[in-house]
Amino acid sequence: VQLQASGGGLVQAGGSLRLSCAASGRSFSLYAMGWFRQAPGKEREFVAGIKWSGGSTYAADSVKGRFIISRDYAKKTAFLQMNSLKPEDTAVYYCALDRYYTGVNSYMSSSSYDVWGQGTQVTVSS
C-alpha cells in the first residue's frame, strides 16, 4: 500500500490549509488513517486519526477545535482541514495508515499506524 500526501504550503497565521492523503495499492486492509507532524528539533506528534468504518475521530489537544480530520470512504482518502493556523503549527505533516484493528479505539494510538506516506511541509508565518 502507498500513501500520497498533498496540500501543504505557506500560509499566514489565522489562515487555513487542507491536506489530503490518498491510499492506493492492491487489496489492502484499512482500519484507520491518521496525521502526524514533526517540527525541527521536536518529537513527532500524533495530530489526528479517523477510524475508517464509522468515521470516529481523534484530535490531539493541541489542535482540537481547529483541525478536522475526515475521509472519503470510497476513494480511500483522508483529509486534514486546518483552520486558525498558528506559527507553532509549522511542521512536516505525515499521513499514516493503520491496517489492522488491534484493540478498542486503537485508531487513537500513534503506535497502531504502520504504513507511512511522505511528508508535506506546512509553514505558518506570523
Image (cartoon, grey):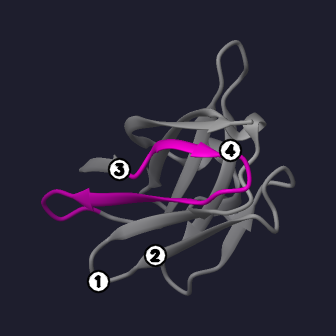
Gap in angstroms between the C-alphas marked 1 and 4:
25 Å
3 or 1: mark nearer the eye: 3
Q: Earlier in the sequence, mark 3 or mark 4?
A: 3
Gap in angstroms between the C-alphas marked 2 and 3:
14 Å
Q: Secondary structure at mark 4?
A: strand
Gap in angstroms between the C-alphas marked 3 and 4:
18 Å
Which residue carries the number 2 mark?
71
Dot 3: within a 10 Å radius of its alpha carbon, few (fewer than 14), some, or many (20 or more) residues?
A: some
* Above/below status of 23 relative to 45: below
Q: Secondary structure at mark 1?
A: loop
Residue at 30 percent across and 60 percent down: it is 22
Residue at 59 percent across and 59 percent down: it is 102
Which residue carries the number 4 mark?
46
Which residue carries the number 3 mark?
6
Q: Earlier in the sequence, mark 1 or mark 4?
A: 4
Gap in angstroms between the C-alphas marked 2 and 1:
9 Å
